[in-house]
Amino acid sequence: AQSVTQLGSHVSVSEGALVLLRCNYSSSVPPYLFWYVQYPNQGLQLLLKYTTGATLVKGINGFEAEFKKSETSFHLTKPSAHMSDAAEYFCAVSGAGSYQLTFGKGTKLSVIP
Amino acid sequence: EPEVTQTPSHQVTQMGQEVILRCVPISNHLYFYWYRQILGQKVEFLVSFYNNEISEKSEIFDDQFSVERPDGSNFTLKIRSTKLEDSAMYFCASRPGVVNTEAFFGQGTRLTVV
């Protein structure tokens, strides 16, 4: 069984500031981890994923995330927030052999000019 | 760029009525999914479909739900007798079937049961 906890349902940052969105997971098997972004009135778009190999993964729009097995975390970061980053971000986990995704509750990111 | 398309974007139905939500997955993808997101809550897995049969389903996916791939391109979710609590955004997704690939999501159908 898998679960995902996203700390903070709403995060506000100033334009140009660091973005940090937290995700912790629980999985009984080696996890595959994903971050999706949802812009208003749109579907879910993949930002980045970790499956195997390098624990620091880079995604689109300057985002990256680091898989830390000891901390069961997969936090999403971006060095400098842009207004266009305002959206809802979802962390998700699946296990090897099952491609069912288990999502966190989402974090809504606001960027203040 | 190939994308998953869903129709309609918004559907309003009366309680007790049947609804069919339609999806066209990306061509050549092998795995198909339905997820739902009740307003203010997390995205929840409903069902996965592979090789013309259900491969996994959640507790939410009870007898009132069914899925079908009627013609090799469309992938449908039928809700037989809708309840107020079925009001949600329903997302279709597809995957190529190659190991380590992500799911590609459609833009969703907002179902409102009145």
Image: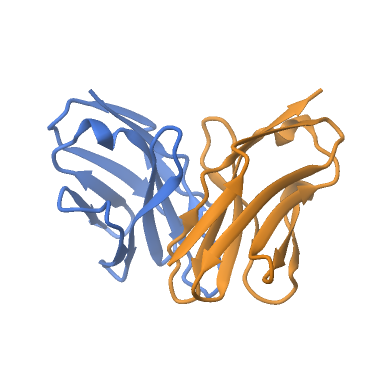
Chain colours: A orange, B blue
Vertical placement of residue B114 versus A62, above or below = above
Q: Residue at x 46, y 45 (%)?
A: B106
Q: Is residue B1 visible?
A: no
Give residue B64's position: percent from left, percent from top: 16, 48
- Relative horizontal placement of residue B10, taking residue B82 as reference (left or right): right
Q: Residue at x 63, y 53 (%)?
A: A23
View extreme (front): residue: A71
Q: Residue at x 23, y 56 (%)?
A: B68
**Location of residue A34 by image quarter:** bottom right
Give residue A26's position: percent from left, percent from top: 53, 64
Q: Is residue A37 visible?
A: yes
Foreground residue, B94 or A10?
A: A10
Vertical placement of residue B40 versus B14, above or below = below
Q: How many marks?
A: 0
Give the position of the C terminus of chain B as an image quadrant: top left
Give residue B66's position: percent from left, percent from top: 20, 53
Q: Residue at x 40, y 65 (%)?
A: B31
Give residue A21's position: percent from left, percent from top: 69, 46
**Location of residue A98 by image quarter:** bottom left
